[in-house]
Each structure stands twice: as C-alpha cells, then as structure tokens.
Amino acid sequence: MDSIHIQTIKEKAKGLEAGPGKGSPNLYSSFPKEIRDALTKFETFFRENLFSSSPLLNEVLKYIFDRRGKRIRPACVFLSAMASAPSKPFNDLTFAGTAAIEMVHTASIVHDDVIDRSDLRRGGKSVNAEWTSRIAVLAGDYLMAKALMLITEYRMFDFMYIMSRPIVEMSVGEMIQIEKSIAMDTTEEIYFEIIRKKTAVLIGASMEVGAKSSGAVHLAATMSEIGENIGMAFQIKDDIFDYEKTNLLGKPTGNDVVENKITLPLIYALKQAGGKKQKEILKCVKQSSTDRKYISTVRDFVLENNGLAYAASVAEKYVEQAISMISNLDDSPAKQALISLSHYTIKRHE
C-alpha cells in the first residue's frame, strides 16, 4: 500500500470518535477504570485496523463504525481477561483478539440485514439500504477476512478455533432460522438452538478470548459458558423488545413477525392456545410480511397469553446461571462488573 493510501486511511480514522457506542453510558459507568480505559484504547486500535485502500469501502466502514452499538463483546473480552487474571495488564493479544471478535460480529449483522432485507439498523439506514446489497455483502466479507488477518498477524493460532466456531455456528443458525420461518414450526428447543448459534456462541467466544489472552487457560471453558448464558439472556431480551417497541404512531414494529421469525414470546403464547387459534395466529404471521396490519393481532395475542412474561422469566434464569458461575471467581472489581453486565442484559431499555 503506498504512502498516499496510508495517509488517507489515517485521516479517516481520526474522524471517528473513541468510546463505547450508543446506549452504553449507564452500563460502562459501573466498570473499573482499567476496563473503561481499555475500551477507549480499543476503539483507537479497532479503527486503525479497519480501513482499506478503497475510498468506497472506507466510506461504508466509517458509516458502520459511526453507528456502532454497545460494544458488549469487547466489554466481555476485557472483563473476562481482568476477572481471570486481576494482576495482569491487558496485552496486545487482548486488543487484537477483541478487534477480531468485533469484526466478526459487525460482519454478521451487515450480512443479516442483507438476508432479512432490512432497511434499518440502530435508528438509521442499513448498509444495504444506504448503498446496495452487493456492497453490503462485500463489506461484510472484508470484515471477516480482516478478523482472520489479525489472528494471523498477531500469531494467535490458539484463537483460530475460538474465532472460527462462531462463524460456522452463525451460518448454521441462520439457515435453521430461514428453514423454520418457512415451515412455521419453531419449537422452544429449536429457538434456543438458533439463538445459541447466532448470538450466544460469539459472546462466549469473547469471554474465552479474554481468559486465554490473560494466560488463564484453566478458566477459558468456564468463562465461555458464562458468556453463552449472558448471550442467551441478551438475545431473549432483544426478542421481547420486538413486541414492546412501537413506531411514531404507537403501533408495534414487530420486525421479527414481518420476517416470519417465531421467537420465544410467540412460541409460549401458541402453546397456551387451541389448534384453531394457533392456525389463525400463524396465518397472521405469514400475512404480516405483505400487510403489517396483522402485527397488532399477533402482539395482542402474545400479551394476552403471557408470552413476554414467560420469555423474561427464561432470560432471568440464564442470568442466574451466569451469576452463579461468576460467583466462584476470585473477588475483583471485574468480577462485580461482570455481575452488573449480567443484570444489564435483562434490565436494559434498548
């Protein structure tokens, strides 16, 4: 890469603000200062390793970066590293591993928006809506490849399986979800399999990377399991939000319903109804993809049959499992912050 391109990339990087993404201040304020400082340093490391020699790709990447989320996965890496080895400072492997994890996550949501034909992401246009699906797919591919390059560059060969597994699992999970959105026969067991593959495995990998980067190999499996429990609760809460959030007219957004995704609140509600009512509601789910007026019917059905309350109780159980395992770790500020993060997954409002 020539010097002009390198300078352009550095200038692009300077235009990005460091710090956690939207919606995170209350969560991050409970973290130890070392974690907050590491997250700020991570933002600089991440953006400096993000850009390419393509002006168009850089424009897309900046657009993605500016709409970054809560940085839950980076937080998990640093919290796990510090909780596993409180006396050891974060090292290059911690930052490189965190960046690779976040690149994989970012690529997955860019690809998901293409698959779901979603025009919105975090209150703005998705990459495929702002540009094209073709550009979005290429941007996602680039991010996946950059993650693998970081692993190689920092010789994190022990992390190769940790990073590769979530990519495989997310792909399989997405395929199962597509299959079930057509068949309309998602059970609780299948739902848990889908969200474990699509969300929880990567959060578990984040925790495992944190432990291994700090040298606490003996805690890697434990931290991974803690992360997966947090991830399960986090995704269930997201699925609850889909029935709670409303648009400017006060009507439910119901994006999952529009995409024919049957998540835990609806699965439970359907189990409470008779066969005739089930068929009626499933017909509404199918029709909602072309006529959104059916969303309110599905949402009211879920509320009347305690679907949201049931889903919330399941999410709480996953949080309890995570906290039970965290309690066995040595006392440290990071341990307490992990407990706070676990509670946050189900207490958050966005």
Image: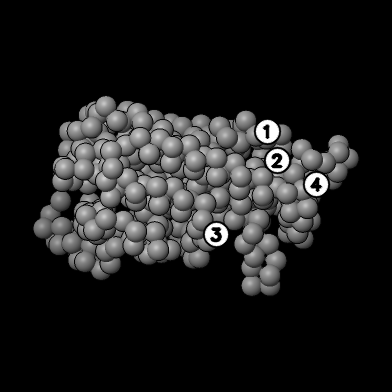
Question: Hey, what amino acid is under mark 4?
Answer: Ile
Mark 1 — residue?
187
User: In the rendered image of this protein, does residue 193 appear above or below residue 21?
Assistant: above
Question: What distance separates the C-alpha of mark 4 from that of mark 2?
Answer: 11 Å
* Residue 169 can be seen, yes or no: yes
The residue tagged 3 is 119
Q: CA distance from mark 2 to mark 1?
A: 7 Å
Q: Residues within 10 Å of mark 2 (few under 14, many from 20)?
A: some
Label at residue 296: none
| Cα–Cα gap, marks 1 and 4 | 15 Å
| Residue lying farthest to the left in this orientation | 3
Q: Is residue 287 visible?
A: no
Residue type (three-letter) at the residue carrying disc 2: Ile
**What residue is at 29 percent from the left and 48 percent from the top?**
334
**Depth check: 321 or 101 in front?**
321
Dot 2 and dot 1 residues touching (CB under 8 Å): yes
Mark 4 closeness class: few <14, some 14–19, many ≥20 residues within 10 Å: many
Instruction: From the top left corner, tell me how far across and down residue 238 is, in percent.
Output: 55, 51
Residue labelled with disc 2: 267
Give the SS element for disc 3: loop
Q: Secondary structure at mark 4?
A: helix
Q: Position of residue 122 (x, y in %)?
A: 48, 61
How many residues crowd mark 3 within 10 Å: few (<14), some (14–19), many (20+)?
some
Q: Which mark is residue 281?
A: 4
Outermost residue to the right: 276
| N-terminal-most mark, 1 or 4 | 1
Place residue 5 in its image quadrant: bottom left
Asked whether the beta carbons under mark 4 and mark 2 sit within 8 Å of each other, the answer is no
Tell me residue 96's x, y (percent). Answer: 22, 44
Q: Are marks 3 and 2 in contact (CB under 8 Å)?
A: no
- Identified by mark 3, the residue type is Asp
Q: As shown in the figure, which amino acid type bears the numbered disc 1? A: Thr
